[in-house]
Image (spheres, rainbow, N blue to C red):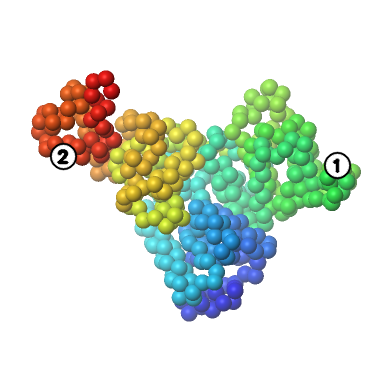
Amino acid sequence: MRRLVARILADAFEVEEADDGARALALVATRPYDVVVTDIRMPGADGFELLAAVKARAPATEVVLMTGYATVQDAVRAMKQGAFDYLEKPFDPDAALAVVQRAAERKRLADAARLAAPPGDEDAFHALVGRSAPMRAVYRLLEKAAAVDATALLTGETGTGKELAARAIHYHSPRRERRFVPVNCGALPGELVESELFGHARGAFTGAAAAKPGLFQEAEGGTIFLDEVGELPLPAQVKLNRVLQEKEIRRVGETQATPVDVRVVAATHRELRDEVRAGRFREDLFYRLNVFSIALPPLRERPEDVPLLAAHFLEKHARALRRTLRGFSPEAMRVLAGHAWPGNVRELENVVERAVAVAGGEQVEPDDLPPDLVASGAAPATGPVLAALPYKDAVAGARDRITRDYLVALMTELGGNVTRAAERAGLERESLHRLLRKHGLRSEDFKPGS
């Protein structure tokens, strides 16, 4: 299959082949590519790992996945993670060539746009997106963290992008050719934490029918990402502290230690200093983890990034769901800009993905957003958020807000009587009806007793 695809593309492109995922990771780590065509299921590293590595190292490189019928759902999930498109096997050679040509054209346009941008005008660092001052400061710290082989601690509220930051550190570091192993410490069963992290010997406990390597050994030579490290039970904290100190692990049920060469990047949404004072987190482990600390800012502290992030997620999910959308209406963008985003970037992405799925027109309208979001985003955008919008969108948003306020006042004053309201406003009755519908208002809601 690999040789067939290479022959299909050879007339139009310079093609290099990799016979497994590990070789592909090595190639993308050493030189730039316009397009990567990869199967999902491969030895060495699967298509998802390769996709993450490509997008972390070179976000503009496009990835096309090949998949069988049984893994189409995986391919759709990969597109949500940044893949350009997928080819379902068996595929027509002309169709395959057309998909890769479209991907290459997209990469060419992205390169042209980047060259045309003012020097230093960077809106992203790998998979992280944002041009605000807080995010630019984060990008600088991530680059420094990637350049040294020290333990790093990422802090920030849930949904701020800590795993994306950890991947950026790994794929920008000298360890990028080896594995990145993410671990959700909060999801590990308490009685199995040590076995999962460090492995166990055969017969170490009931059910241990065979010896098993731990996640630290799986990450040998690469990076292990300990997400929500503050959730680890105290006994596991003791062993983790020893691993960081001695650079060796001891499987459950064994007395002999095994050296490991692994970089640790940890993350937490908790304030670990408070956890130390409360006796829930070991002070010595905190200081070993907190060698290179990076705080990810909540979205409410960088509101000027909301329009940029929303556009990024719209493009990503429209491509994954094969929808054609031109963007957000000014009123919809005003709603997004006015929301406080307690769930941070993750909440924004979920809202945009839902909007892409339900939008019935050529752009996302307020009706495509969750009703509670529309209510919370009713306040006018000010300051950095307003400055981040194009002039016409900012003016249109203000006009829509004034129009809605006027309609509410008018209908309240006249008790929902559309005929009298139209006369007072100097509008045709049908024109007033259209305005009410556009702004989500119903005349019956203003009638006495409603």
Quadrant that contains the C terminus: top left
Q: Splitting the image into 4 quarters, where does residue 275 fall? A: top right
Tell me residue 223's x, y (percent).
67, 49
Residue 256 appears left or right of 282: right
Q: Is residue 339 visible?
A: no
Q: Secondary structure at mark 2?
A: helix
Q: Splitting the image into 4 quarters, where does residue 321 fall? A: bottom left
Give the residue pinned by disc 2.
Answer: 430
Tell me residue 423's x, y (percent).
10, 31
Quadrant that contains the N terminus: bottom right
Amino acid carrying mark 2 in the image: Glu
Q: Nearer the viewer, mark 2 or mark 1?
A: 2
Q: Secondary structure at mark 1?
A: loop
Sequence-earlier tag: 2 or 1:
1
Compared to residue 362, the image places residue 450 above or below, namely above
Residue drawn at x 63%, y 56% as measured from the top left: 176
Residue 67 appears left or right of 219: left
Compared to residue 45, the image places residue 297 above or below, namely above
Residue 79 appears left or right of 250: left
The disc at residue 205 is 1
Tell me residue 51's x, y (percent).
56, 58
Q: Is residue 46 visible?
A: yes
Q: Relative to the observer, which residue lies in front, 93 or 239?
A: 93
Residue drawn at x 25%, y 44% as measured from the top left: 392
Amino acid carrying mark 1 in the image: Phe
Count all numbered tags in the image, as a single digit.
2
